Amino acid sequence: AERTDVDAIVSAHRDAGIEILSPDSVEWPDAFHTDPEPPPLLFVRGDPALLASVSVAIVGTRRCTAAGSATSRDLGEGLGAAGVGVVSGLALGIDGAAHRGALRSGGPVVGVVATGLDVVYPRRHRELWAEVALAGVLISEAPLGTAAERWRFPARNRLIAALSRLVVVVESGLTGGSMLTVESAIERQVDVGAVPGPVRAPASAGPNQLLADGCCLVRDAADVMAAIGVHLPLPASRKQQDEPAPLVDDPVTNAVAWTPTPLDDIVAATGLPFTEVASQLMVLELAGVVERDTDGYRRTTR
């Protein structure tokens, strides 16, 4: 402590546009006053007032499926449109998709990171970090220059749980960072929700187990709103508003499942000529109703 020039450290953070919050600060989150393991300080870029928002954490695996990413994005967008804050760790996969959805809706976004606010991790999320800091708030308990270290991520996850009214797991294995966030939530008496998935899919093992254990079922933003007891109008998503009715009622759409469906199976189910099915699938893909991957086509909207 004698070798530390506190004034110089504070000045360096202020020069970088970073505010330092302590438990005595007006913007210090109420949840941290009673937390069993609160951060000693918070380093903040953006609007610290958003830390008081009614918020939900959306977490999951970095190696998510296309369907998981779309679900996470839709949840973030739906909650953001209703004025509910979206908290996540800005990791690859589910986390990043949730924040992109919330940013799209213009809703409150809270990014909780494990490094200094000048050390972007993962590097490919540099632009997303900047967007969250500009439109919402980016926080860390680590000062400038702090590098990514393995132990810092589980520590970061307890802050995600503490700031949230509900922790939603979209896709996850039975172990990993998402399940550590769940443990932190349970320790803090924060409710946990999960998005169901195919029983044989590795990415659905964690959420399906949580549902078997009695956690609340999450299919969309409306389920989340009901779980946290917040009753705000949920506008139809932009995709639903723009989507022509015929696209969701035709035989080709109905033949596409929520899991990858081979093209031959779609043709067989519709009884239509191959060229007609392929043409309609192209229309549906451009409209965002279905998406294509290596195993076929899957639905993305109802």
Image (cartoon, rainbow, N blue to C red):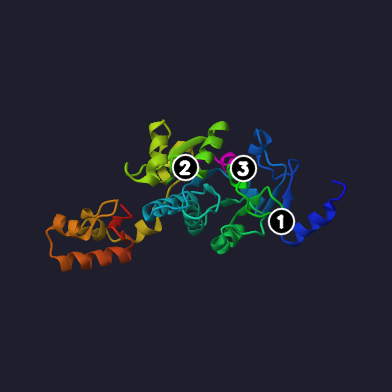
Q: Residues within 10 Å of mark 3 (few under 14, many from 20)?
A: some
Q: Earlier in the sequence, mark 1 or mark 2?
A: 1
Magenta segment boundaries in residue numbering: 158-169
Residue 148 in sight here: yes
Asked if the residue at tag 3 contacts the one at tag 1, i.e. Cβ–Cβ closer than 8 Å, the answer is no
Q: Earlier in the sequence, mark 1 or mark 3?
A: 1
Viewer-proximal residue among 123 and 76: 123
The residues bearing labels 1 and 2 have C-alpha atoms spaced at a distance of 30 Å
Left or right: 125 in relation to 46: left
Q: Which residue is mark 1?
A: 144
| Amino acid type assigned to the residue bearing label 2 in the image | Val
Answer with the quarter of the image where residue 23 lies: top right
Viewer-proximal residue among 235 and 200: 200
Residue 251 in sight here: no
Q: Where residue 167 appears, x then y in whole percent? A: 50, 40
Left or right: 214 in relation to 95: left
Q: Name which residue lies at 18% across and 56% down.
A: 265
Q: Which residue is mark 2?
A: 168
Asked if the residue at tag 2 contacts the one at tag 3, i.e. Cβ–Cβ closer than 8 Å, the answer is no
Label at residue 155: 3
| Amino acid type assigned to the residue bearing label 3 in the image | Ala
